[in-house]
Amino acid sequence: PYVNTKDILEKANKEYYAVAAFNINNLEFLQAIVEGGIEKKSPLIIETSEGAMKYAGMGDPLRGASLFVKMVREFADSLDIPIALHLDHGKNFKYIISAIKAGYSSVMIDASDKPLEENIKATKDIVRIAHAAGVSVEAELGKLAGIEDNVSSEESVLVNPDEAKYFVEQTQVDFLAPAIGTSHGAFKFKGEAKLDYDRLKKVKELTNMPLVLHGASSVVQEMVEIAENYGADFGGSKGVPSDILKETVQLGINKVNTDTDLRMAFIAGLREFLHNNSKEFDPRKYMETAKEYVKKVVSDRLELLGSANKA
Ligand code: G3H
Ligand code: 13P
Ligand code: NA
Ligand code: ZN
């Protein structure tokens, strides 16, 4: 069934596991994610960025949002596993309202680049509108290093736990993304991977709510190697290692945002297939291996995070 993201995450919070939230831009990634979810009997959170809404709608975000809702609902309505659709990094009022109007299960209002009181004000406004429509809300505190959709920040500013408590009380958000040292994309750490566990632990103690880890891709080495064997150059790429991810789940993370790992798996499969099948030009065929690798990465992640058999 198609469900509210809040329902998926509150169960995860009570039972100490995390659900991966997978970013999509098109049908093929959605199919691969759904296959992984069915195989693992796991709840699923599908998310799209504002850029994905614009891309799918050919410049019209409401049209893009409506297409995503129709695709996701078509699977969700006919399957036993709970599936939610979430707007990732909502920054523009127009996009957030479009997602709510189109029927998303939840939205993120990301005003994390603004000073605290402005973040609170922007978040409160969205919470009021979203909650009236039965849509749950995610917000972010602190800054991730690296490039976010429509935002770039060079240095990361980690979450302040006392501010997190105050922010949550003031805004009534349903889940919170605290910055604890991750970043978006395939190049997360120059040296050893390191996250601020103490900060995460404090935020959990003070808020007791479902928490979200952004920039959580692991940059699966096997996929990097396949892609590089067939012409890619992903030198220097590094993600959040599995054991560190598991540790964050033990400390209270319940939603694990994952985009890069699926992009890497897809490109690995696509490159491999094209290299080995120089006469093929049917897209349904040449995306087969790509989708298979995305499904594998999805399944592995659901297992790792503990959401397998929680549907
Ligand atoms: O947080 C960023 C997500 O990976 C989405 O990125 O703006 O390229 O769709 P995008
Ligand atoms: P990755 O780039 O690590 O996959 O992060 C995705 C993300 O945080 C989307 O909001
Ligand atoms: Na999000
Ligand atoms: Zn993110």
Image (cartoon, rainbow, N blue to C red):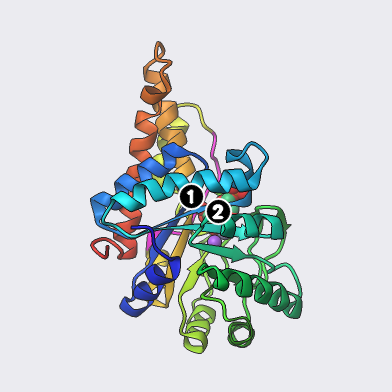
Quarter placement of the N terminus:
bottom left
Q: Is residue 108 visible?
A: yes
User: In the image, is residue 193 part of the stretch drawn in magenta?
Assistant: no
Residue at (34, 76) in percent of width and height: 16
Q: Picture quarter containing residue 188?
A: bottom right
For the C terminus, which image quadrant?
bottom left
Q: Residue at x 56, y 46 (%)?
A: 236
Point 74% across, 80% down: residue: 117
Specify which label sits upstream in the sequence, 2 or 1: 1
Distance of label 2 from label 1 (alpha carbons): 7 Å
Main secondary structure along the magenta-highlighted residues: loop
Q: Which mark is on residue 69?
A: 1
Ligand 3 neighbours mark 2 (CB distance < 8 Å): no
- Please indicate whether residue 276 sits to the left or right of residue 200 in the image: left
Q: Which residue is mark 2?
A: 102
Number of residues whose C-alpha sits closer than 10 Å to that of mark 2, classed few (under 14), some (14–19) or many (20 or more): some
In which quadrant of the rendered view does residue 181 lie?
A: bottom right
Q: Is residue 278 rendered to the left or right of residue 37?
A: right
Q: Position of residue 199 (x, y in %)?
A: 54, 80
Question: Of residues 77 and 217, which is closer to you in this image?
Answer: 77
Q: Is residue 184 visible?
A: no
Residue 121, how many percent across, how many down? 72, 77
The residue under the point 39% across, 75% down is 10
Q: Is residue 21 left or right of residue 88?
A: left
Instruction: Answer whether labels 2 and 1 touch (C-beta < 8 Å).
Output: yes
**Which segment did they paint magenta?**
233-242
Image spot of residue 30 (x, y percent) = 41, 44
- Image spot of residue 173 (x, y percent): 56, 77
Which residue is at the front of the view, 120 or 189?
120
Q: Which mark is residue 38?
A: none
Residue type (three-letter) at the residue carrying disc 2? Ala
